[in-house]
Amino acid sequence: MYAQIIIEYPVKSLDKCFTYVIPKQFLDTIKIGMKVKVPFGKSILNGIVIDINNNKPDYEMKEIISLEDSENFLNEEQLSIGKYLQEETLCTLITAYQTMLPSALKIKDQKTDYNKYEEFVVMDDEYACEEYIKMHPRAFKQIEILELLKNDKIPKRMIDNNIVKVFKNNKLIKIVKEQKYRINIIDILNKELTLNEEQQIAFDEVQKQINEYNVFLLQGVTGSGKTEVYMHLISEVIKNGKTAIVLVPEICLTTQTVQRFYDRFGSSVAIFHSGLSKGEKHDEYQKILRDEVKIVVGTRSSIFVPLKNLGIIIIDEEHSDTYKQESIPRYDAIEVAKFRAKYHDIPLILASATPSLEAKARAGKRVYKLLTLTKRTNNMKLPEVQIVDMTQEVSKKNFIFSETLKDKIIERLTNQEQIILLLNRRGFSTYITCGNCGYTYKCPNCDITLTYHKTSNNLRCHYCGYSIKKDDSCPNCQGNSLNYLGLGTQKLEEELNKLYPEAKIIRMDQDTTSKKGSYQRIIDDFADGKYDILLGTQMISKGLDFKNVTLVGIINADTSLNIPDFRANEKTFDLLYQTSGRAGRNIKPGEVIIQTFNPDNETLNFVKNNDYEGFYKYEMDIRHKLKYPPYTYIATINIKSSDYEEAGKSANQIKNYLSHHLSTASIIYGPTPAAIFRINNIYNFQIIIKYTFDNRLHESLKQIDANYITNNKVNIEITFNPSHF
């Protein structure tokens, strides 16, 4: 028997199967999808078995050396997903399979045992124990322990070490190890809530087709109870002996969402996201493999978990671009979810208060089935939104907070209500420049200014990670005229503390949530009323539910409008509408203040009027005129090299190849320098292709990819439907 094996090197020149002989001792245990160790050239490498057959090749073969981790292997569905990713994203097959596994189980030599164990004391010889008790009638503590051991094991940590030593010396006991999970949930199951009329209609529509493949778009205003609909559907699925995957876009969103699932479904829930330690991820994955859970809640990579008997997939906040992976393989979790839903013939639910234009358009064409929730569950009105013109405020010396927002904050603090403030830029200052000579701190590796972080007194590049300490004087002219320009969350926090010294303020951004558990701590503390004001970046904009928040302030709403991205309006609307939705979610009415230098901007006024439908029509008209998605598809080719000349030459060669091989229906733009031309001393050129249908495109891009497999000077990255470029 022979095995077709792909090896662990993720280089495209080795992206193929190699045939190995299966030794007799492995014939009964080897399985397709299993990890193995094989000789390759002069090395010994790990790989995955893709096929087992009797087809003997014409060349001399080597034997498999060993089978690795026979309990953890890729199942048939995962093998299919890997081939799908290879075809759709042009990645190597081994890269696709590596992406599906938590780091503790990746296909490589594992030097760490991620299993956690607890030691237990068990009785070894009952007769010897009885004799020991007779001989030591006054050893009351020891006798008590031996009597308990007759009926059950005892954790070793609960017995004095000296007693354990005596028992072992007398051969009365033995120590056994049992695997222990790091995350354990006590089952305290809350009852299901009764659905309102709109929720019930949405539930019924999906439930009628619970055993068929369909994509449903659940569009519900903020606070309309979309999560409750999910839970009712999942209950139905579990009754039928099946399982569910629920995706959320951000780690911080899993905190409140996961708690709701724990409260409803208890230990049937596993969580899966990058905030877990390697050991925790390993444990949660083992629960899934052992069929110990029915529901997995997590971020993007959770779409690959090997749940058996999958019955439904739900993607919350489907508009979020975090569902698209930026690194290889550049997959879209929504597209992978469609693949899995088709594979199992089950429904996929895409849900959002602000659906992506692509999803909404597909619902309009009835490719997706539209379900709507138009009211909040408590029948409270959506928050009142007020736009404040900052050009007038600046003339009054109000550079950060308008008079209106300052007054509203005082009012809420007086009433002991809570406030959320959004500024979608972390750090203290966007950049530092010298008033004497004009010197600006820039990253030496990237074409971008350094961001100042005051707490660490560091200037940091948010692209390559370069960091330096800030000087007291200008490093160019040694003058003392350094100006701190731009506004970040650190500076905003400092200004708030000056204005409201009695207020308890907490900041939530990447700097304050880098430590494990920090998301949960901040959210729990704010929910418990320990803080009056929560300020942060876009991570506070969606999914969070705080009963006492009655005011939301948007500082500098223009930030996301001014980025060079055709989705800038859509992303701004999503961000502001979702953040606005954090206000007035309980019995107290909510209010939102949006500060802007462009008060007449159409997008901002659609947010003001809580008018998603109006924004959708307005933006779709622009997209149609400019031939942008959803009226076209987009593919990008990024040409990267440390050599400027080589990058430019290859970019032009690729453009010429495309011009000769694509149909005239495809529009090719570029090559042009990428938005940030140099990152980490790598030059970036970009080619953009707009297309509707071009049967030559995929093969042409695969050929371009193949042409650069062995090129060690130029690297190319091909992305289909990128979230930005």
Image (tube, helix red, strand yellow):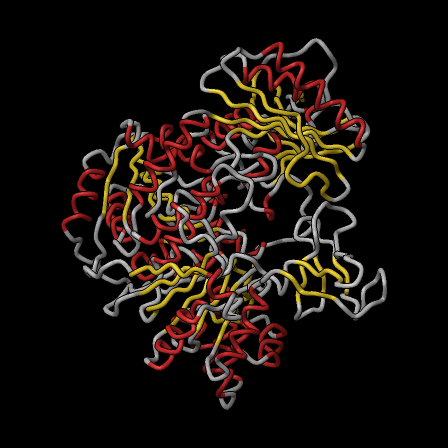
Using residue 367 as the reference point, say whether residue 126 is left or right of it.
right
Q: On the rendered image, what quadrant is the C terminus found in?
A: top right
Q: Kindly give the residue lying farthest to the left in the view shown.
A: 197
Q: On the rendered image, what quadrant is the N terminus found in?
A: top right
Q: Does the rendering let one see residue 92? A: no
User: Above or below — where is 184 with respect to 638?
Assistant: below
Frontmost residue, 526 versus 471: 471
In percent of the image, x 50 and y 60: which residue is there? 423
User: Above or below — where is 242 with respect to 153?
Assistant: above
Using residue 230 as the reference point, say whether residue 52 is left or right of it.
right
Frontmost residue, 715 versus 594: 594
Using residue 208 as the reference point, say whether residue 298 is left or right of it.
right
| Residue 290 x/y as whole percent | 44, 46
Frontmost residue, 29 versus 550: 550
In percent of the image, x 43 and y 73: which residue is there? 406
Answer with the quarter of the image where residue 418 lies.
bottom left
